[in-house]
Image (cartoon, rainbow, N blue to C red):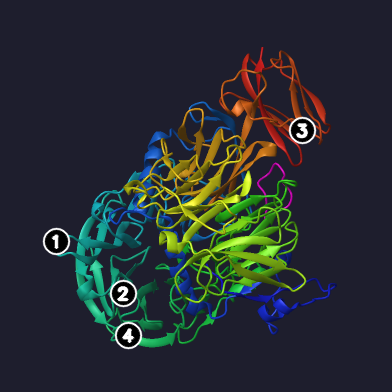
Amino acid sequence: MKKVFFLLAVLILSSIVFAVSKWQNSHFSKTEKFPAPSETIVLNKGDKEEKEWKEQLEREEWINRLHKTAPDADWRSIDQQTRYMNLLRKSSNTRSNIDTLANGFLTGFWKERGSVNQSGRIVFADYDTSSNAIYAASDGGTIFKGSLNGSNWTPITDHFNISGIDYLAVLNQTSSPRIFVAAGKYCYFSDDDGTTWTTSTGINAVTSWGDIRKAAVLNQDNENIYLLIQEWDYTNWEEIISIYYSQNRGTSFSKLVSYSTNQMGSINQHDFWADRYQGNTLYYIQQDRVFKVQGNVTQQIGSIGALTNDRSMITGTNVGGNLTLYAYIDQDIYQSINGAASWIQKANVARNPFRQNSFAASYSNANAVFFGGVNCARSLNGFSSWEEVNQWYDYYGSISDKLHADIPAVIPFFDENGVAKIFICTDGGLYISDDNLQTVENLSLHGLNCSQYYDVYTYRAQPQYIYAGAQDQGFQRASQDTADILGFEQTVSGDYAHIVSSDSGASMWFVYPGFAAYNDDATTGNWDVSGDFDGRGNYWLPPLCEHPTIKSKVYMAGDDPNGGTGAFIYELTANLSGNNVSYNQLPADVQALTGGQISAFTYSPLDTDYWYALMDNGTMVYSTDNMSNWNVGGLNNGPEAHYFHGASIYASKAKFGRVIAAGSGYSNPGVWVSEDHGVTWEQMNSGLPQTLTFMIDATPDDSLIFAATEVGPYVFVAKDSMWYSMSSDAAPDQRYWSVEWINASKTVRFGTYGRGIWDFSFAQESDTTDTTSVNNLSGLNEQFHVYPNPAKDQLTVQSEQAKLRKVDIYDINGRVVTQIYPTENTTTINLSHLVKGTYFVHLHTQTEHSIQKIIKL
């Protein structure tokens, strides 16, 4: 969800004077103040419903620009095929604790870091009466299983990310329940609780062009499944809307009917609804015409008389054997109580739906109807009138019983006792109601770990501070780096990215769709000053680069603020005394050289006069005089990079002149390397699949280069000149959006767009054998000692700086064989019960950890 540019309120503890500065006076509402946990700032969305569609389009444009492809390539389909091939290579979704990756070059430990309390978007959910379990599908593509009281959440598809889920149903079978999912261009089903997945057949045409727009299960006893699909007629060369149906619980589908959009309206004017629990009829709306579908027979049964070029939707309920239908046409709600023969116009709901599943009626009260946009509207009188369940900003003062903003789905269901209840999916997790949304309960307060992070940054001097920019769950901060999955504090609502710092995290800059903000002490508060883009930002979240030495300055890439052509770098300065951010446009127009916009840029840490920038059209420029002048590099001097869109650029800390460019790699190589500041380039994609690389980082000597990609984490081993997947059973199959190398702990930290933050910490080799580049990383966890090695009956472990709080010993298969909880810096462990072989010792202090390999004699 995208917020607009004004701060609405801050509630400070009553004992503190609420001092409002000049900037705050212009950005805070003086009439509305809301309680906000952890001093969360709540951004004022203004006319949010009106602006929501514009902002969604801006975000989609930004995402599509990053995923640049040839015209005939579909990046979503390419990525999903890669994920499915990876699934086939995996033996199971069980996890071991120690991983040996990259053809034996890496040995270490994957660990989930959080958040445990800031759930991201849930797009759909269903309830299985046989196991009394909820199945919830996240926007990040992971399905979770949990209890009806919001406890015991467990991801069941960490081994297989299902991108673009719009629908999920748990179908009762004789043996075990079947989980059915409709997602993007594909349908999948699993008969073993998510361990293995099979692709439904019969809808192959949509994989070339189109999308599954809606799915519905008709009558749980028969469990016929219908799909509403947007596809292409290659004979008549036009877009068509088709209905497919399955009579075998989604194993295969057959086309029922197709309509030309030239004659029957766009996909947004088509919708259907079916009663999940009874009956044999699917109700289908085309613009204002209503049809019933029984089996493979379609028949028009009514017309609403409100022809529109906007959006049409339909829902209904069957209470006591009496069918009630509701239709949405261009924000007006209509009702029929005679099987669609006639319709009565009710109220105007004053919003567009957030998604296709945002419109629903209760199974217990035919007059209870719900409509989700940014807020969720509730009517208990058949939409003669309606009210908000709550305002979006109420969430920040009462997270447990107020809906988060943005409502992808409202889902009525019956529990195991036949009691009608309702799931409400939001951008902040999953809710439930048993009284038709008169009250709601948040089921995602703990353990529904589907945080969606654009960027993650760790304070190097105090690594317990971890900062994260989230999708619609604000700017977040963790301040206690314990051994557990971390809880994060949301300091301000909204969408945040491009976290940069000139002093390694003591202070911080970041962007929001509309402004850049600076926090002088990043360990506390929200920010000190901010400044609106005022037309300068070419991207929804424009790229930033820290100033090499001055913490109060940052550089931002943008375009001409007056609406003209151009691609410029802006120097932003945080003026704490004046309480504002000033923008200084550097004179060089990079677009005049390349014809493109700057999509990523950085400087050489070995000589800060040297700067490098990637463009959105596959070109690259470099500067040798601190951005006073730019030169065109040789990146796009042939067809190999024609569809390359730069997303990340890395300047080596080890070799002056080495630059690595990463970005869209669907129709061309996705990673390139230059050894001469960008004058010439070579492909660097051996072992990397066709995908988008969001970000890269490296060890100080460039022996290992890490990539966060659409299809998982990757590492380039310089010794082998090859990319290797870092995916394993211990790490989730996800979009890995950010990556950073933390040298002090020899950990690579990834931020994912659906499963939060994940660390891979390297195991230390205690012998001197030069087997891999990993073993020779200098200063590897020097504060920890394990001796003797090899060991026979006893092993001593020691931490020089802090007391040990936990020690785990794993065998070569990742099983815990010994676990102790010391209270001192040094302790001795009995090994006499262990058989001879190789083991891994994982040592924890309050803030640090280390993994070291030992030999048991």
Magenta range is: 479-489
Label 1 CA crowd tier, 10 Å (few <14, some 14–19, many 20+): few
Q: Earlier in the sequence, mark 2 or mark 1?
A: 1
Label 2 CA crowd tier, 10 Å (few <14, some 14–19, many 20+): many
Q: Nearer the viewer, mark 2 or mark 1?
A: 1
Query: Where does residue 633 sit, x and y in percent of width and height?
Result: 45, 50
Q: Earlier in the sequence, mark 2 or mark 4?
A: 2
Query: Where does residue 243 sit, x and y in percent of width and height?
Result: 25, 63
Labelled disc at residue 821? 3
Q: From the viewer's perspective, is residue 444 above or below residue 578?
A: above
Q: From the viewer's perspective, is residue 373 above or below residue 830?
A: below
Q: Amino acid at mark 3?
A: Tyr
Residue at the image point whose x is 57% and y is 57% from the top = 627
Labelled disc at residue 343? 4
Identify the element where label 2 is drawn: helix
The CA distance from mark 2 to mark 3 is 62 Å
Check if mark 2's residue and mark 3's residue have beta carbons within 8 Å: no
